[in-house]
Image: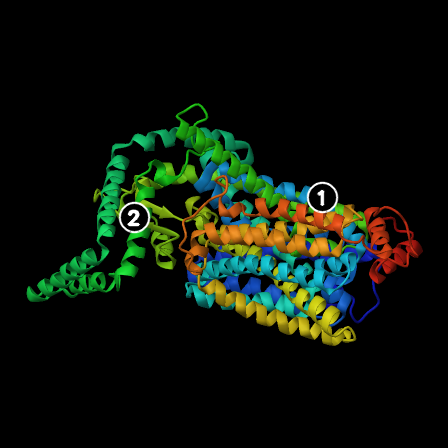
Amino acid sequence: MAGFFGSRDGVKLSKQQFKSQLDRVYRWYTVGFVLFVALLAGLEQMGLPRLWIGFTFLMATIGLYAGIGVMSRTTDAAEYYVAGRRVPAIYNGMATGADWMSAASFIGLAGTLYLTGYSGLAFIMGWTGGYCLVALVLAPYLRKFGQFTIPDFLGERYGGHLPRLIGLSAAILCSFTYLVAQIYGVGLITSYLTGIAFELGIFLGLGGILVCSFLGGMRAVTWTQVAQYIILVVAYMIPVVWLSVKQTGIPLPQLVYGFQLEKVSAKEKELAIDPKELQVRDIFRQRSEAFTEKLKHPATSLAADKQAASKRVEMLKARNASVTEISAAGKTLAALPRDEAAARRAWTAARAAADIKTQPLNGMPAHAAQFSGDPDGTPKEKELYDTSRRNFLALIFCLMVGTAALPHILMRYYTVPTVREARQSVTWSLFFIFLLYFTAPALAVLVKYEIFTVLVGTPFDHLPAWVHAWSKIDPALLSVVDVNKDNLLQLNEMTIGGDIIVLLTPELAGLPYVISGLVAAGGLAAALSTADGLLLTIANALGHDLYYKMIDPNASTVSRVTVSKILLLVVALLAAYVAAQKPADILFLVSAAFSFAAASFFPALSLGIFWKRATGSGAVLGMVSGLGVTTYYMFTTQPWLRATFGITSPIELWWGIEPISAGLFGVPVGFAVIFLVSLVTPPPSPKAQELVEYIRYPDLKVYDRSFATPASRQDDAFRHQSGDGL
């Protein structure tokens, strides 16, 4: 079986035989997975506890991925870095789909659409458009180049170690940021499945990541990601189809999306003027005003609060109150801020949270509203509308360009046999990603309709068990408080995070718990698959580009792969530690990675392919300046980063652009710097310019160009001998 994944010890199969064997193995794998879920469903009906179901899903899926990693283990450089360059286009498309369907896409996308409505479509448009850029601008040309990594291209195209060093630094920055988000998602899902602590869940899931990428590199990651895609697409589709049938009787959620959106819009209008909702919003308005008063004299207010809390504890003890009452009063006293600075931070955050809940619909915009504000309203409303529209377009731009420049995605197109299959692979990637992206908007609307019409108005003592279960895992993700003491849940009495919307879907649909476990396993597959690819990107950048290309060019294949494995382990542990600190929400971390990738790589890669005059000096300065502008803007405007690095200066947004779209400023700066510096510096060497001609025409059959990289010459020779077209 080990030979199947790479023919490591046996005779290599022909291209057609290899694909036929893959078809047979994954067909049986899919059947086996369906039977496994059906078996668990039967055991649940017989009384199997939920905790056991969660542990079974967790251990079975991680064990499966680990098994593929063990069977795919290798020390061969080509197998470890690019899976031997023989992954069929359709399977590379599935692997890319899994690599792409990160925790942000699987867990966070529908949640973002739930919370933001129309504006959340920027993520779908940007990410999908990015793959069009990959197909047209980068993937075929990088595959023709035929090396292992993106810094490899920068080093060969622009000459010298400096472009390679800047490239690998940028690759580590954007990949590590993205990686932290995936490991955060792993911890969230693992704790949900098993009930263990979030931090422990992170390191438990990390074991599954490491076994795959550590032992077999890209070969193990590729075949694991194909298996993970099958799990995640099944897990995503079942509950949303069921919810669609429950609400409309039609098993095609994409078709009923518009009808349910009309119902949601009508319900939004009702909730906006509902007397109970108005009462709750008024209570939060009073709380906001109280925090405002406290912040005027924080030291005095804190002392008064401590004195009042202490007196209450003493009073309860004096009248021999119950242990429960005394304990609750003691916890209230202990929870008060320690000093004036802590009080100021806590009360500012509490006031901001209360301000949101003074707004209709719990601070969410109307789902069908295109942008905030009104183009025909007051000057303030017009300005808000223009700013909202600018941010929508800016986010689409950053996500498109960032997608086209993400190193862990571009690396996938090094694994296919030919340039033609690189193009086909992008098409398959778009198809497999489309299955989920076309469904996510419908899922958000179906969940919102369910919450608005079923959950809202339910007595607190009749709320589903999952509400209390999620509150125990993380109150920031889901919590309910009876603010107006009427024992009925109002929308503004609920706090819900976007990261759990998908995980809630089975329980909202009334499905058995085994489907909840399946969805969690799908989310885990999405997070693990992306984490595998990101870890490999970072480890390869350090082991291949830094160690082999720059420090020890004479290193043996075994030592190169060994160094990459050691570095992979170190990076994984570091990322797990950072994720355990819960640094920010998944979506911001992912979006930051896109801005970093867009500003650092896209100008250098695209100009390196399409403009022979682009020089190494221009590329280095362009990458540094683009990344520098993006980083500066993000660090000075994003609240979490400002707090982390102690930045106290006033926030100044450029043209009202949010920090999530910081790459909007870095990308044009990178293009301009590369262009201007290249014009005033000596032109590239004839070899570099010939290399541009070589990769610019991926359909040109050239087999003996001395300036081509060794890997690309081997590819050409293989195609020439076998008669396989480009």
Q: Counting residues from the N terminus, which is met first, the one under dot 2 or under dot 1?
A: 2
Displayed quadrant of residue 254: top right
Q: Residue at x 26, y 45 (%)?
A: 288
Q: Residue at x 68, y 74 (%)?
A: 563
Q: Which quadrant is the N terminus positioned in?
A: bottom right
Instruction: Identify residue type, mark 2.
Output: Arg
- Please name whichever residue, 328 or 517, is drawn nearer the observer in this view of the structure: 328
Q: Position of residue 142 (x, y in %)?
A: 76, 52
Q: Position of residue 82 (x, y in %)?
A: 74, 61
Q: Position of residue 105 (x, y in %)?
A: 55, 49
Instruction: Identify residue type, mark 1.
Output: Thr
Within-10-Å neighbours for mark 2: few <14, some 14–19, many 20+: many
Outermost residue on the top side: it is 376
Within-10-Å neighbours for mark 1: few <14, some 14–19, many 20+: some
CA distance separating discs 2 and 1: 48 Å
Can you see residue 387? yes
Residue 351 is marked as: 2
**Which residue corresponds to mark 1?**
427
